[in-house]
Image (cartoon, rainbow, N blue to C red):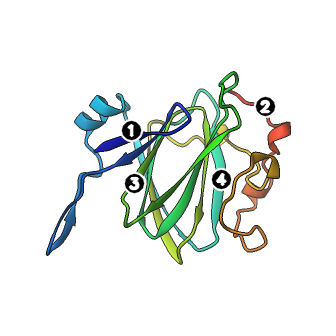
Amino acid sequence: MEVIKTPIEGLLIIEPRIFSDARGYFFESFSQRDFDEKVGHVTFVQDNESMSTRGVIRGLHFQRPPYTQTKLVRCVRGAVLDIAMDIRKGSPTYGQHVAVELTGDNHRQFFISKGFAHGFAVLSEEAVFQYKCDEFYHPEADAGIQLSDPALGIDWRIPFDEAILSDKDTKHPLFKDFESPF
């Protein structure tokens, strides 16, 4: 696997080695040994999967301490624009984000450390999205930031008048009203 650094510390793009032939392809989607060597040791405890249709935007989510999560995300079918925004107080990149297109064809994965809000927009007709977490989901620690806040400067590539959002995601605070727990 190749690890690609992003402009924000704590966010990495991971590209697996793909072995293709007349039968199709093969790759290791996760190897604890390679991950420990190239990224660092993380013990993932929960895998999640969602299926969404074009125009769905999910986010920007995180879990408050002590239940913060490190994530390793990927799109196994379709295409998504994945966003991670730095919400670590005192970080030189606080409030900045990285956007990565993850597709079933490019097989890229996005490593997101604790201290980031995360979301994605579905660009294809349908997308299956998977992610590993190093902490279990705790509904009482669930939090977010208003993903449509223009102050964030995020181009979700989906016009908000066409976006499909959960009721919960429309009620998160704007960034200026946000109190980071990190």
Q: Which residue is mark 3?
A: 108
Q: Residues within 10 Å of mark 2 (few under 14, many from 20)?
A: few
Asked whether disc 1 touches disc 2, contact meaning CB atoms under 8 Å apart, the reply is: no
CA gap between label 4 and label 3 equals 20 Å
Q: Nearer the viewer, mark 2 or mark 3?
A: 3
- What residue is disc 2 on? 179
Q: Amino acid at mark 1?
A: Phe
* Residue type beneath disc 2: Glu
**In this picture, is 93 found above or below 25?**
above
Are the two marked residues, 3 and 1, in contact with CB atoms closer than 8 angstroms? Answer: no
The spot of residue 59 in percent (x, y) is 65, 53
Q: Which mark is residue 44?
A: 1
Secondary structure beneath dot 3 equals loop
Residue 59 tag number: 4
- Name the mark on residue 149: none
Which kind of residue does numbered mark 3 sit on? Arg
First in sequence: mark 2 vs mark 3: 3
SS at circle 1: loop
Residue at the extreme right: 177
**Location of residue 76 by image quarter:** bottom left
Q: Mark 2 to mark 4: distance in Å?
A: 17 Å
CB-based contact (under 8 Å), mark 2 and mark 4:
no
Q: Look at the numbered disc 2 and give the secondary structure of its residue.
A: loop
105 to 132, vertically: above or below = below
Question: Which numbered disc, 1 or 2, marks the residue closer to the eye?
Answer: 2
Q: Identify the image quadrant of residue 170.
A: bottom right
Q: Residue 182: x and y, percent?
A: 66, 26
Q: Residue at x 46, y 70 (%)?
A: 78
